[in-house]
């Protein structure tokens, strides 16, 4: 079993996590782990979106043209 610790959270937050865990038949730590993974994924997507928005238009046009060639070559 992984080493454990205690964190202080507002009682209403703890209660909400507990209700969700009970509804899903899961443990509170598993709900927190899932929430953290969803947060991490959201942050990855935001970084990706920011990188795409920062990409110069000519690079995007070049990428679109190149992928169109691949699509045509592989009949996608």
Image: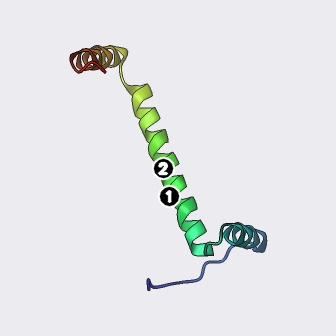
Residue 41, numbered label: 2
**1, above or below 61, in the image:** below
SS for callout 2? helix
At x 50% / y 58%, what residue is drawn?
A: 37
Q: Nearer the viewer, residue 64 or 9?
A: 64
Residue 29 percent location from the top left of the image: 57, 74
The percent position of residue 69, horizontal first and vertical second, equals 24, 15
Q: Residue furthest right?
A: 12
**Residue on which the image places disc 1:** 37
Q: Is residue 57 above or below residue 55?
A: above
Left or right: 29 in relation to 22: left
Q: Quadrant of the C terminus?
A: top left
Question: Residue pushed farthest front?
Answer: 75
Q: Residue at x 44, y 83 (%)?
A: 2
Are circles 2 and 1 on residues that touch, CB within 8 Å?
yes
Could you classify mark 2 by the number of other residues whose Cα lies within 10 Å: few (under 14), some (14-19), or many (20 or more)?
few
Asked which secondary structure carries label 1, the reply is: helix
On screen, residue 37 above or below 49? below
**Dot 1: within a 10 Å radius of its alpha carbon, few (fewer than 14), some, or many (20 or more) residues?**
few
At 26% across and 14% down in the image, what residue appears?
A: 72
Q: Is residue 6 left or right of residue 73?
A: right
Tell me what residue is drawn at x 61 percent, y 78 percent. 7
Query: Residue 35 sits in which quadrant?
Result: bottom right
State the residue in front, 22 or 42. Answer: 22
Q: Quadrant of the N terminus?
A: bottom left
Q: CA distance from mark 2 to mark 1?
A: 6 Å
Q: Quadrant of residue 73?
A: top left
Q: Could you tell whether 65 is left or right of 34 in the image?
A: left
């Amino acid at each position: 079993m992984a080493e454990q610790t205690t964190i202080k959270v507002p009682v209403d937050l703890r209660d909400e996590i507990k209700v969700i865990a009970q509804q899903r038949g899961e443990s509170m730590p598993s709900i927190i782990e899932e929430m953290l993974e969803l947060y991490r994924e959201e942050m990855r997507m935001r970084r990706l979106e920011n990188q795409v928005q920062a990409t110069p238009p000519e690079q995007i046009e070049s990428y679109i043209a190149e992928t169109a060639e691949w699509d045509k070559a592989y009949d996608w």
